[in-house]
Image (cartoon, rainbow, N blue to C red):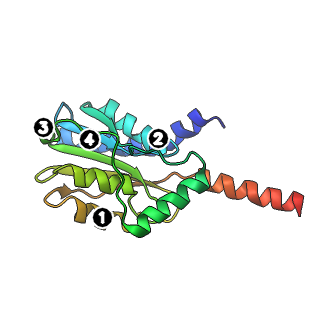
Amino acid sequence: MSDLSRRGLLAIPAILAFAGTAACAQNEGATPMTGSKTLVAYLTRSGNTRVIAETLHRQLGGDLFEIRPASPYPADYEAHVAQATRERDSGFEPRLAAKAEAIAGYDEIFLGFPIWGETAPPPIRSFLKAHDLRGKTLRPFITHGGYGVGSAPAVLTSHAPGARIEPPFVMEADQERRTLNQIKSWLGQIQG
């Protein structure tokens, strides 16, 4: 299966869930979640979270912002995981490549990220600390590799004081680790 079609398939549950939420809100007379007062901010490693973020952006309007550390993580999966684990364990929060412009103008922020090491990634902690989200509605969308959200909700609460944090949209979407493990297992069988 190609990357594009795999990612497209992964996005289907997110599209349906968020489209349903928006439709229900409009049917109940609530203010639609569109316009320049909405920001979709996301961090991605393999592209799964980006697919959801771009879908939300298309459906909701507003602005799209990719959260990136100033110094990129290694492209190699295992090196990336090792660095993220060291950062998590030491409490390191990396400098970001950019801040979201005019954050004060947004009422609602959809914040997307994958779970790294059973918690929110260090760049997400940096993003939350770099932006004052008091009085804003924070709508997390989280992807994970099978272990759930871990301590991510507690990180959001501690790093976004004064924000109204809505229940997250959560989706298992990690094929990278499974693929790596399957390849290693296969190689073990043919080399052993």
Q: Around disc 4, counting alpha carbons within 10 Å, would you say few (fewer than 14), some (14 to 19), or many (20 or more)?
A: some
CA separation in Å, label 4 and label 3 = 14 Å
* Label 1 vs 4, first from the N-terminus: 4
The picture places residue 129, in percent across and down from the top left corner, at 23, 55
Q: Earlier in the sequence, mark 1 or mark 3?
A: 3
Residue denoted by label 4: 99
Camera-near label (1 vs 4) is 4
Is the C terminus in the top left, top right, bottom left or bottom right quadrant? bottom right
56 vs 173, left or right, is left
Helix, strand, or loop for circle 1?
A: helix
Q: Earlier in the sequence, mark 4 or mark 3?
A: 4
Badge 2 is on which residue?
Answer: 12
Asked if the residue at tag 3 contacts the one at tag 1, i.e. Cβ–Cβ closer than 8 Å, the answer is no
**Amino acid type, residue under disc 2 in the picture:** Ile
Please name the residue that numbered disc 3 is placed on: 105
Residue at 66% from the left image edge and 37% from the top image edge: 1
Q: Which residue corresponds to the image point at 29% horizontal and 67% vertical from the top-left?
A: 154
- Mark yes or no: residue 109 visible: yes
Task: Relative to 162, say whether 15 is above or below.
Answer: above
- Residue that label 1 marks: 155
Given the image, on which type of amino acid does mark 4 rest?
A: Lys
Q: Residues within 10 Å of mark 3 (few under 14, many from 20)?
A: few
Q: Earlier in the sequence, mark 2 or mark 4?
A: 2
- N-term-proximal mark, 2 vs 3: 2
Q: In the picture, residue 3 is in which quadrant?
A: top right
Q: Looking at the picture, which amino acid does disc 3 mark?
A: Gly
Q: Residues within 10 Å of mark 1 (few under 14, many from 20)?
A: some
- From the viewer's side, name the closer residue of 27 and 139: 139
- For the residues labelled 1 and 2, the Cα–Cα distance comes to 27 Å
Give the mark toward the camera: 4 or 3.
Answer: 4
Earlier in the chain: of badge 1 and badge 2, it is 2
